[in-house]
Amino acid sequence: MKSAGTDAKQHSQNVTLEGVICVILWALLFVVAYWIISLIMRFVAGVVWWCLWWLKVTFAISVFQSILSDTGAPVETTATRLVFLALVCVLLGVGTTPAKPDAHLKDRITMLERRLTEIEKSKVD
């Protein structure tokens, strides 16, 4: 510390137990606040994602009902409309469930880890 131009003894005299406790409490408060804010943001993101999924499903069902209720359209037109609706549903992801997209990721990882250990065992034998 002397080579940097500061005296270490001088700064250590200013550190008190109350100061250390204050810094620790502020750090703990920061960690707890960060945790709470991250939980709230994760909840809000989940609710928004769920609402958008229901909006997509409602849109698809209403368009499907509209296509089928058009009795004056020829069969080819109705079939074409249904194909386009199916393509839009695939692109929007309407067929998926409103669960988290990585819900089964942990199961896949454990399955791949098991396969990897089996392959490693077969190479050793």
Image (tube, rainbow, N blue to C red):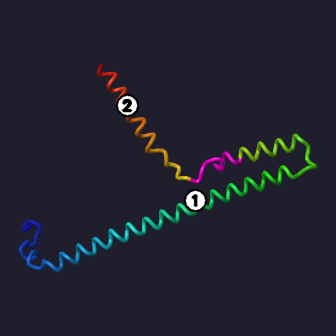
Quarter occupied by residue 84 = top right
Q: Residue type at mark 1: give it.
A: Trp
* Secondary structure at numbered mark 2: helix
Q: Is residue 125 above or below residue 46?
A: above
Q: Is residue 97 magenta?
A: yes
Q: Residue type at mark 2: give it.
A: Leu
* Secondary structure at numbered mark 1: helix
Q: For the N terminus, give its image quadrant.
A: bottom left
**Residue found 85% across the figure and 44% down from its top:** 78
The residue that mark 2 highlights is 116
Q: Earlier in the sequence, mark 1 or mark 2?
A: 1
**Residue found 13% across the figure and 79% down from its top:** 16
The residue that mark 1 highlights is 49
Q: Is residue 95 magenta?
A: yes
Range of magenta residues: 88-98
Mark identifier at residue 20: none
